[in-house]
Structure formats: C-alpha cells, structure tokens
Image (cartoon, helix red, strand yellow):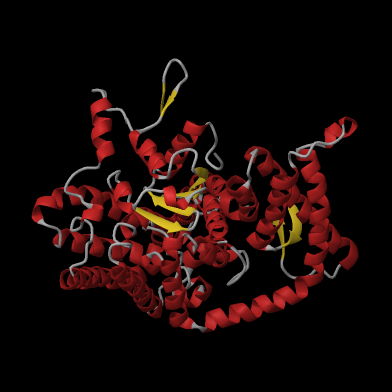
C-alpha cells in the first residue's frame, strides 16, 4: 500500500514542474502590466501592455488547465504498458466526463445552475478540481492495465486496445458524472465546513501543516498531503496556486496587507525553511566536519544548499543526515513549523512553498512595490532562523557526536565516490558530460558507472521489477528486498540516501533521477516505469 501511495505522490508532482517557468511569466507579466508600479507605459492600449498581455495569455496555460494536466499525471506514472496510449485514453475520458457533467446540469437542472461551474478546455462543467481529474484518470488507468491487451474476436478487432479501454471508460465516466451531479450539494456543504475549520486555525494550523509536510518527506508522501490544498478546492475554489496567480493584479494594486487580502493562502508556507533553514544546516555540517574533509564536503553542500534555496528541492540535503542523525531531522521539522508560524503570525502570506525562484516569480517581483515591507520583515525573521538552525544543529552534533556528512563512515566525504574516478578515467579532453548515456555508432547503449552501480546495488536487472523517477529519487520495486545492497555500498557510489519499505526502495540521487532511471531501464530494454 505504501508503495502505491509513493507512486501516486510521484505522479502528482509531474504537472508541478511546469509552475517554475509559468509562474515566472505570470509574475513578470503582472508586474509589467500594473500601472501603479510601471506608470503610463503599462496603461491600457500601449504597445508595452499589449505585448505583455499576449505573453500572459500563454503563461496562464498551466494554471487555467490544471485539472487537465493532472488527468495526464497518473497514466504517466502508473500505466503498466503503453503509457502514451494510456495518456490519450485518460485525456479523452476526462473530457468526456466534463462534457457529460455539463450536459446533465444543463438538461436536467435548466436555468438553476449550481455554484461552482468552471470552463475546462472550453467545456462548461462543475469544478471537481484535481480530485475529479484524478478519479476519472485513475479509473481509466485501472481499465487500461486490465483490458488493454485483451484480444477480441477478429470481426471486433477495431474495438481492441485503446478503443476497448475508451468504451469501458465511457460507461464508467457516465456513472461518475451522474454521481457527481447528485452528490454536488452535499459535497459543497462539506467543503465549506472544512474551509471554515482550516481558516479559523490561524498560525497554529499553518505550523501543524508545515510540520506534517516535512515529516512526510522521507516517505515521499508529502505530495499527496499538500496537493489537494495547493491545487484543489480544499481551501479556496481552484486551489491556492491558481487563485493567487489570478489575483496578483488586484494584490499588486492593493494597499491592504496580504493576510487581509488573501487569508486562504496561509498554508502555502512550507518553503521558508527551504530558503533559510538549508544554509544554517549546511554551515553546521561544515563547521563540525574535520578540517581535512571540509573541501570535499563543501563540494556537496554548496550545490545541495543552492538546490534547496533556489528550487525548493530539499531531499539531497535532508537525506544526507536523515538516517545517520534522525534527531536532527526531528529538530528540522520543529524549526520549520516554528518559522512558518512566526512569519504567518506577522501577516505575511502568499505562495511560499517552493524556493526563491518560485517565491520571486509569484510574490517578490510582482508585489514588491506594494508589499515590500512585509517581505523585508519576513526576511529578517528568516535570517534569524538561519542562525538558530546553525547553532542548534551544531550543538546537537557536537554534544551527541552525530555522524553527519563528513563525520561518519556511512557518508564519508573525505574522498570522491568510486564512480567519479571511473568516469574520469574514461573521459576525454573535450569536457563533455561522461555521466550521461552515450550511444555508439553501432547503436549499442552504454550507461554511466553510477547508473550501473545503482542497478547492481539493487540486485541486478532480475531483481528490479519497476522503476519510476521522482524529482530527486528513484522509486524502485524489487522482487527480493534481501538482494538489495546495504547503505554503505550505495554510499560509495555517491548516493545521498536509501529508504526501504518492504519491496519498495527509494534511492536518493539528486536532480539526475529522471536521467538515471532512463539509463537503468535501457539496460533491460524497458522504459522508466516498468522493466
């Protein structure tokens, strides 16, 4: 069961990858089309305004069609075969569901249209958010996995494969559409009650939310936890991200505090520790590392810290000490919650779940002119917590003699990993990336020593049942968990951490996870989902 939830969480993260660039376009477009900030050049009808409004129309794509994108996430991550066809089936069935819901509402309810109607890909339907998209897509994936390879009689051959899956999914989507319309009033009532409870929890609710999100990170389940809040209707219609992006022009022109204008955005505060906590942790690891190992340790800490601060990806840094010093991770969870509590209590809310790139795109760039003082206060608190992280981590490391990076044999930075030396010996003088997959003139595929080492550590191709890449980790299903090498063997490869739960193994490798998954899969002639 845990393995299935982990796969689902990894699949949910895929559409989120689009937000970094889309958010940048929306943030810049909002800034450059706000007359209160830019002056007459941004007035309606100017060439400057027209150009940026065109760019904004493209930037809104990921936010306006979010349920549509999430409907494609599950088949990409959970389809057992023919993932491309499964994506087509899921897209067609989800649009069919929306058309059916819209038709039922129009035909049977007439002018009494219920609240919560939206337009998805031009289809007027009830706003079921990503829950509806995932439910319909999940049913489609299940039917695809079960019936895609079913052979029909020759005279019915035209209905085989994708057509057969769509036929079955059409019937299922019709039943789901009827159920959705019938249950809609009760669902809206429950949703309003839940929203009222969340919003009334105040800063304590924010702290609890952040603590749970951080605590679930090692299991890879945090995507499942925050996705309904950030991208669905749990707190506000259309989700925090979409609503915040659409209200940026009003927020930029408003003199009210952000907490007054958008109290529903409070829960999106998981990124403060990524920006301000990461450098404090890294400095503590560096200060407590033996001097002869510090240069090697810095080669890891600098990119890992920057990855956390800029992109909001914390796994490379967190997994470096999670298993060797769980006491520090517990402290990290508590400090993350406390930092979010204080910043929220100061009235600073917004989209703060990612790193500095996302924060700047959706907050600092478009809103600095009207809310810069609020951000400066939050930065002051954040810098204070950088010092708190450093002092508290350093105290625990020295008092308890914790084997943090550079101090223990399990994660020894006194030398570079074995795969690095083998790559160097194979490399040439052209400075090219020898870690990537190369293809010779004969068409034979060669994988990097790191990918081959990870595959060997997992027990070889015969032991790897399936592999799915997440942003920073490989989610692997193995046939025999006992055949997987110990953590020390993976550490010699430069792997940042290994998490085991029965037949599910997560290998933390950093942002090269998708590339390594493809390399490992190529050895067995499969794809990045099933070997």
Q: Is residue 198 left or right of residue 392?
A: right
Q: Is residue 127 left or right of residue 289?
A: right
| 462 lies above or below 376 | above
Looking at the image, which residue is at 43% across and 63% down? 217
239 versus 141 height, above or below = below
Q: Where residue 120 sits in the image (x, y, percent)?
A: 70, 54
Does residue 285 lie above or below 161 as drawn?
below
Could you say which quadrant of the image residue 361 lies in? bottom left
Based on the displayed image, in which of its 4 quarters is residue 81 positioned?
A: top right
How far from the left and from the top, in percent, is residue 387?
Answer: 21, 70
Q: How many badges with numbers are in the image? A: 0
Residue that lies at the very extreme toward the left in this rendered image: 291
The foreground one among 415 and 198 is 415
The image position of residue 379, as x and y in percent, is: 30, 68
Which residue: 39% across, 64% down? 271
Q: Is residue 249 visible?
A: no
């Amino acid at each position: 069961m845990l393995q299935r939830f982990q796969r689902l969480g990894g699949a949910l993260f895929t559409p989120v990858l689009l937000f970094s660039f889309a958010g940048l376009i929306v943030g810049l477009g909002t800034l450059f089309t706000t007359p209160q900030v830019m002056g007459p050049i941004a007035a309606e009808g100017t060439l400057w305004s027209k150009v940026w409004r065109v760019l904004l129309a493209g930037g809104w794509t990921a936010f306006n069609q979010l349920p549509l994108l999430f409907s494609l996430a599950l088949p990409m991550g959970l389809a057992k075969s023919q993932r491309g066809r499964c994506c087509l089936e899921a897209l067609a069935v989800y649009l069919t569901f929306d058309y059916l819901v819209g038709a039922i509402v129009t035909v049977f309810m007439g002018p009494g249209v219920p609240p919560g109607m939206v337009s998805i890909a031009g289809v007027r339907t009830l706003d079921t958010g990503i829950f509806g998209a995932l439910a319909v897509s999940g049913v489609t994936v299940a039917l695809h996995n079960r019936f895609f390879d079913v052979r029909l009689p020759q005279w019915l051959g035209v209905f085989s494969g994708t057509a057969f899956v769509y036929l079955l999914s059409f019937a299922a989507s019709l039943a789901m559409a009827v159920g959705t319309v019938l249950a809609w009033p009760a669902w809206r009532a429950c949703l309003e009650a839940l929203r009222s409870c969340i919003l009334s929890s105040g800063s304590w609710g924010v702290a609890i939310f952040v603590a749970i999100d951080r605590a679930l990170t090692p299991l890879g389940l945090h995507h499942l936890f925050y996705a309904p809040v950030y991208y669905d209707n749990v707190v506000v219609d259309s989700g925090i991200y979409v609503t915040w992006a659409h209200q940026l022009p009003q927020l930029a022109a408003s003199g009210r505090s952000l907490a007054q204008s958008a109290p529903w955005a409070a829960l999106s505060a998981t990124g403060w520790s990524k920006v301000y906590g990461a450098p404090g942790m890294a400095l503590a690891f560096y200060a407590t590392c033996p001097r002869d190992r510090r240069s090697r340790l810095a080669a890891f800490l600098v990119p890992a810290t920057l990855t956390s601060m800029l992109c909001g990806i914390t796994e490379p840094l967190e997994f470096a000490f999670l298993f060797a010093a769980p006491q520090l991770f517990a402290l990290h969870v508590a400090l993350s919650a406390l930092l979010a509590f204080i910043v929220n209590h100061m009235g600073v809310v917004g989209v703060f779940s990612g790193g500095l790139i996302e924060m700047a795109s959706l907050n600092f760039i478009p809103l600095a002119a009207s809310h810069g003082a609020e951000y400066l206060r939050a930065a002051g608190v954040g810098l204070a917590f950088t010092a708190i992280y450093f002092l508290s981590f350093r105290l625990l490391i020295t008092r308890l003699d914790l084997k943090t990076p550079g101090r223990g044999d399990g994660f020894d930075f006194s030398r570079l990993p074995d795969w690095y030396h083998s790559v160097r010996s194979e490399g040439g003088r052209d400075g090219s990336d020898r870690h990537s997959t190369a293809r010779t003139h004969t068409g034979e595929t060669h994988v990097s020593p790191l990918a081959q080492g990870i595959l060997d550590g997992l027990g070889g191709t015969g032991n790897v049942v399936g592999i799915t890449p997440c942003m920073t980790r490989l989610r692997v299903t193995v046939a025999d968990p006992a055949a997987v090498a110990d953590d020390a063997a993976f550490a010699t490869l430069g792997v940042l951490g290994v998490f085991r739960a029965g037949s599910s193994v997560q290998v933390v490798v950093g942002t090269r996870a998708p590339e390594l998954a493809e390399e490992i899969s190529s050895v067995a002639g499969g794809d990045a989902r099933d070997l």
